[in-house]
Image (spheres, helix red, strand yellow):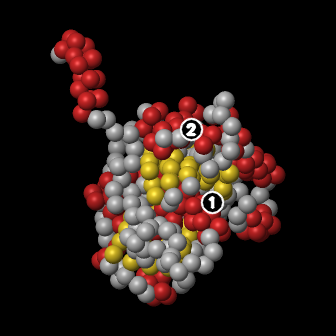
Amino acid sequence: MLVLGINAYHGDSSAAILRDGKLIAAVEEERFRRIKHWAGLPTLSMQYCLDEAGIKFSDLHHIAINLDPKVNNFRRLLFILRTRPSLKLIFERLQKRTQTKSVQQSIAEAFPGQAMKAQVHHIEHHLAHLASSYLCSPFKDAINVSIDGMGDFASAAWGPGVDGKSTIEDRVYFPHSLGIFYSALTQWLGFPHYGDEYKVMGLAPYGQPNQMDLMRKIVHLRPDGSFRINLDCFRHHKESVAYTWDNGSPDCGILYSEGLEALLGPARKKDEPLDQRHKDIARSVQAMYEEAFFHLCNTLHKRHGGENLTISGGCGMNSVANGKVRRHTPFKHIYIQSAAGDAGGAIGAALIAHQNLTSSTTTAQPSPSPTTSREARFHMSHAYWGPQSSDIEIATLLDAETNRIQAEG
C-alpha cells in the first residue's frame, strides 16, 4: 500500500511517501523552489516522492494531509460564543477553511492527464506531529509532546504512546500558544521574517534572564501542565493577522499588540542597534519557553512515569531547550523528529493514515500488525530522505561548467 503525505498551504510545505508503512522518500518544497520556508501545494516534492517510489500519480492509493478542518469544531464554537469576534474576522476564517477543503481539487489539477484514484485522508495537525516523532522513534512506549504556533485550532497536544498507538490526552486550544508567544517576541525584538525565531535563540546567550517577572506576566503556567498567554499582549485572537505566501514565501503579520509594548516598551525598529536590554529580553523569552516546556514535561512524567519522551511541533526546533531536557526532567531517552516543524507533518499524516487503514482492514491474528510491532515498525534513524547527487552526476556537472568556472576565476 502506498500513502503520500503532504504539508500544504503553510510554511515548510513538504511531501513524504510510504510503502507498506516504511518511509521511501521525504522532502521539503523549498529544496526545489529555492525559496526559504516555501508555502503552497508542494507539487515538485510530491512528484519527487512518486518518482522515488517508481509510480505515477494515478497509481497512488492514498493521500494524507496534516490538517483536518472538522476537528475541534466545538472549541471553535465556544470561542465564538465567548468572545463574539467581528463578522469580518469570522468570514475571513471561513474563507481560509474553504480553501483548505479544496485541497483535493488542487491536487488533482496539479497532475493533468492522470486520473486521481487516491483516497484523501485529513489527519489532525497535532496528531500528525505526534506520529512524526513517536511512530518514527525506536520506542515501544513513550510520552509524546507537540508544541507549535497553531494548527486545527490547537497549539499543543500531548499523550502517551503505547505499543505503537499514539493518543492525544489533552490539548491547548486557540488562542493560547507558546509558539505565538515566541514568534510575537521575535517580532518585537526586530526580527520580522517568517522563521526568524532562531535569531532569538542565537541572541539569548548574550543576555541575562533578568526579565522573567515580565515574562511571567505574559505566560501563565497551570497545575495540569498546560499554559495560558496574556491575551492583552497579542492581536491574533481579536483581529485578522495577515498570513500570505506571495511567490511561495510565507509572511506573517504583526502578532503583538500595544499591550506588549506597554509592558516591555517600544518594539525594536529595523536597523536599530541591539542593546543589552534586547539581549536580556531574548534570554528571558528563551528561559520562559523552557520553563513552560519543562513544566509540561515534568507534569506528564508525574502522571504517567516512564523514561522515553518524543518531541515534535515547530517549537521542537528549539534545540537549546531540547538539549536541557535530561537536566530538567526525569526523562532519560529523547527522540526528536528531525523535521519537527510542519514539514514533518507530512510524514506523520502518512503514518497515521497507514495505521488507520491497516487496523481497519485486518482481523485478529496471532502475530502483531506491522504498525504495532516494535520489531517491524519503521524507525527513522537519519534525515537523508531527499534528493541526492551521485559522484557521476557531480562530475558531469563540473565538466559541463568548467569553462564558465575558469572564466569567473
Residue at 39% across, 77% down: 308
**Residue 326 vs residue 295: left or right?**
left
In the foreground, 172 or 84: 172
Spot occupied by residue 220 in the image (x, y as percentages of width and height): 53, 74
As helix, strand or loop, the secondary structure at mark 2 comes to loop
In the foreground, 321 or 104: 104
In the foreground, 74 or 82: 74
Name the residue carrying label 2. Answer: 56
Outermost residue to the front: 366
Q: Is residue 342 visible?
A: no
Q: Residues within 10 Å of mark 1 (few under 14, many from 20)?
A: many
Spot occupied by residue 146 in the image (x, y as percentages of width and height): 50, 66
In the foreground, 337 or 111: 111
What amino acid is at disc 2? Lys
What is the distance, in whole Å, between disc 2 and disc 1 at their CAs? 24 Å
Name the residue carrying label 1. Answer: 123
Q: Is residue 90 above or below residue 208?
A: above
Residue at 18% across, 14% down: 406
Q: Quadrant of the C terminus?
A: top left
Q: Is residue 69 above or below residue 56?
A: below
Of discs 2 and 1, which sits in the foreground?
Answer: 2
Spot occupied by residue 166 in the image (x, y as percentages of width and height): 54, 73
